[in-house]
């Protein structure tokens, strides 16, 4: 039995694989993610949990390990999972997808969302934001209403996201509400439709379709601001499914 934090498309594939030999309880943030896992016969919990709440569930179920396959930028979830493992007295392991290396004069790498917003403010133009809705307020604070800057935000077509856009004052015509994954052709069409001069994204890795976002932007001569992954010290971190299974089999 295991407690599993699922936050990416490849995390879903890992959960399905592990559930073939283990009783997996996956925790997710959205109902759509839960439905995808439930269709594969995997039990789910929807909603964020504190370290204490995770530990309670692990103890109550008798889980033997916590597998953290949350999104590379979900720092709080990973910290809570590590603390929960200590509280429940079980091992913790981390699945982290591979990073991508890019070399281009058009790419500027930054460490924080705030730094990305300030870099975009200096460059001006039509800015396409591909970082989701969670940190949208940082970018509207610095970019919305600025002369010579048009902020276009792409995010999941959820009611709460649209309500957040309205509350922050982002006009409807500057919202792209779409569900991915996005092909290179679609990314190209969107960049051209909005006459994009600058794109902001996170370094989520190849599975997160960051390569299509970046390569298509570069092919069009669009500048890219790339927000680097948070620097965290993960115990028992693995980059592929086989190593995860080998570690689990050894406990």
Image: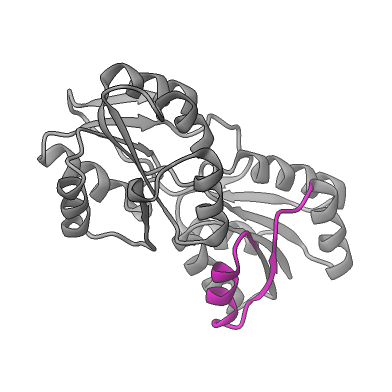
Total labels: the figure holds 0
Magenta span has 35? yes
Q: How is the image coloured?
A: one colour
In the rendered image, which quarter contains the C terminus? bottom right
Q: Which residues are magenta?
A: 28-50
User: Who's the residue at 42% across and 31% down the image?
Assistant: 228
User: Who's the residue at 71% across and 66% down the image?
Assistant: 2
Q: Is residue 164 left or right of residue 67?
A: left
Where residue 196 sits, quadrant-wise, is top left
Q: Is residue 135 visible?
A: no
In the rendered image, which quarter contains the N terminus? bottom right
> In the image, residue 92 lies at what x, y percent?
69, 50
Up/down of 171 relative to 53, above or below = above
Q: Is residue 44 left or right of residue 180?
A: right
> In the image, residue 72 lies at what x, y percent?
51, 44
> In the image, residue 7 lies at what x, y percent?
55, 56
Magenta span has 183? no
Q: Is residue 127 left or right of residue 27?
A: left
Where residue 9 sits, quadrant-wise, is bottom left
Q: Is residue 27 visible?
A: yes
User: Who's the residue at 73% across and 44% down the image?
Assistant: 80
């Amino acid at each position: 039995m295991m407690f599993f934090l699922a936050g990416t498309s490849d995390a879903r594939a890992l959960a399905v694989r592990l559930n073939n030999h283990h009783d997996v309880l996956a925790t997710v943030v959205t109902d759509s993610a839960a439905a995808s896992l439930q269709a594969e016969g995997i039990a789910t919990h929807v909603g964020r949990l504190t370290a204490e709440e995770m530990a309670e569930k692990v103890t109550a179920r008798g889980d033997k390990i916590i597998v953290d396959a949350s999104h590379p930028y979900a720092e709080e979830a990973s910290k809570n999972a590590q603390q929960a493992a200590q509280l429940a007295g079980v091992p913790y392991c981390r699945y982290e997808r591979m990073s991508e290396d890019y070399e281009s004069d058009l790419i500027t790498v930054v460490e924080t969302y705030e730094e990305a917003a300030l870099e975009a403010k200096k460059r001006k133009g039509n800015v396409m934001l591909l970082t989701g809705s969670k940190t949208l307020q940082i970018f509207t604070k610095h970019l919305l209403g600025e002369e010579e800057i048009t902020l276009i935000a792409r995010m999941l077509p959820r009611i709460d996201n649209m309500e957040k856009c309205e509350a922050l004052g982002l006009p409807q015509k500057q919202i792209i509400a779409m569900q991915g994954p996005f092909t290179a052709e679609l990314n190209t069409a969107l960049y051209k439709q909005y006459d994009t001069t600058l794109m902001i994204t996170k370094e989520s890795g190849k599975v997160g379709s960051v390569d299509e976002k970046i390569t298509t932007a570069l092919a069009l001569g669009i500048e890219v601001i790339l927000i680097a992954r948070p620097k965290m010290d993960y115990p028992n971190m693995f980059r592929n499914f086989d190593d995860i299974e080998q570690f689990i089999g050894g406990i």
